[in-house]
Image (cartoon, rainbow, N blue to C red):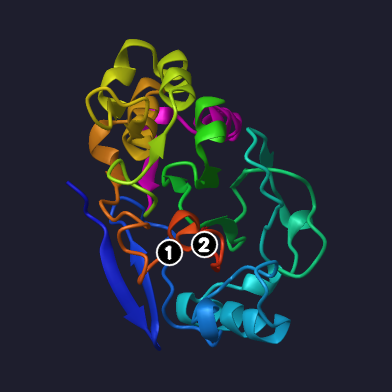
Amino acid sequence: MSRFVQREKNGLVYMTSPVISANHAFTTRFGGVSEGYLASLNLGFNRGDERGRVMENYRILGRALGMDVMRAAYTKQVHGTHVRLVTEADRCCPTDPDPCESDGLVTDVPGLPLFCFTADCVPLLLHDPVRGVAGAVHCGWRSSVGDIPAEALRLMRGLGSRPGDVRAAIGPAIGACCFETDADVPEAVERWLGPDAARSFIKNKAGSAKFLVDLRGALRCRLIQLGLEPGCIDVSDECTMCCHEKYWSHRYTRGERGSQCACICL
C-alpha cells in the first residue's frame, strides 16, 4: 500500500514519502508559470518552453522546498545504467552544460540537491539516514533491466551504506494498467529478475502479443533482492498516464509535454 502524501506550498503541489526523512519531492504539473500545453510546472528546457518561464519554475520549486536549485547536481539522461558520484565540485545551475551522460546521481554532501526527470519513466529516490547518503535515479525500462538500481547501491555502499539501512521511494510513473509493450520488455525483465519476474507482467488479452508490465513492482522486487527491507520501500500507486492532468505523461500526450522531477537533498 502506498504511503505517499500530497503536499502544497505557495501553490506548488508535490508528493513526498514518509520513508524518506531527507528533504525531497516528486513534482506534479501544478504550481509553475508555464503556459499553454506546458502549463504550469514544466522543468524541461528542451520541451519548447520559454527559458525564462522554466527558470522561474525552478525558483518556485527551490523556494517552496528550501533547496538551492541553482547550485545542485544535474545530468543528461540517456536511458543508460551509468550512475555518477557527485561532490561539491559538481554544483551547477540547471542551464549549465550537462556534466555528463548519466541516469543516476549519488552523494554524501549535505545541502547538495540531486535531480532526475521523468514523464512516465520511474523516478527512484534512495536515502540512507545512518550514513547520510542519497541517490536520485531515472529508471526507464532499459535502465532498469540493465540494473541501474544495483549500480546506485554499489556507489552508496562505497560511501559506507548498508542495504538494510537504505530507504527507497518509487515515485509516480506509468503503471501496469497502461504500460503496454511487446514481448521484448517482459523477456528482459525475466533475465533481470529471474524467477521473481512472474508478478511483473501479464498478457494484455488472450491471444495478444502485447504485455502489461509493472515496472515499479519490478523495481521494488529488485531492491529487495539487493538487500533493502520491504517495509522501507514505498511505491506510489499513481499512474502518470491515467493521471495525465496531474503529471506529465509522454505516452498520453505523444511527446507534447513538459518534465517533472524527483529531487532529494541531505
Res 16 quadrant in image: bottom left
User: For mark 2, what is the residue?
Assistant: 261
Whether tag 2 and tag 1 are in contact, CB under 8 A, the answer is yes
Give the magenta part as a residue range.
Answer: 147-171
Q: Cα distance, mark 2 to mark 1?
A: 8 Å
Eyeballing the image, is 57 above or below 4? below
Residue 160 visible: no
| Marking on residue 25 | 1
Helix, strand or loop under label 1: strand
Would residue 233 be visible to someone looking at this image? Answer: yes
Asked if residue 161 is among those painted magenta in the image, a careful observer would answer: yes
Which residue is at the far left?
Answer: 1
**x, y percentage for residue 164?**
36, 30
Could you tell me which residue is drawn at 69 percent across and 83 percent down? 50
Q: Residue at horizontal 66%, vertical 48%? A: 77
Q: Which residue is drawn at 25% across and 24% down?
A: 199
2 vs 1, front mark: 2
Mark 2 lies on a secondary structure that is strand
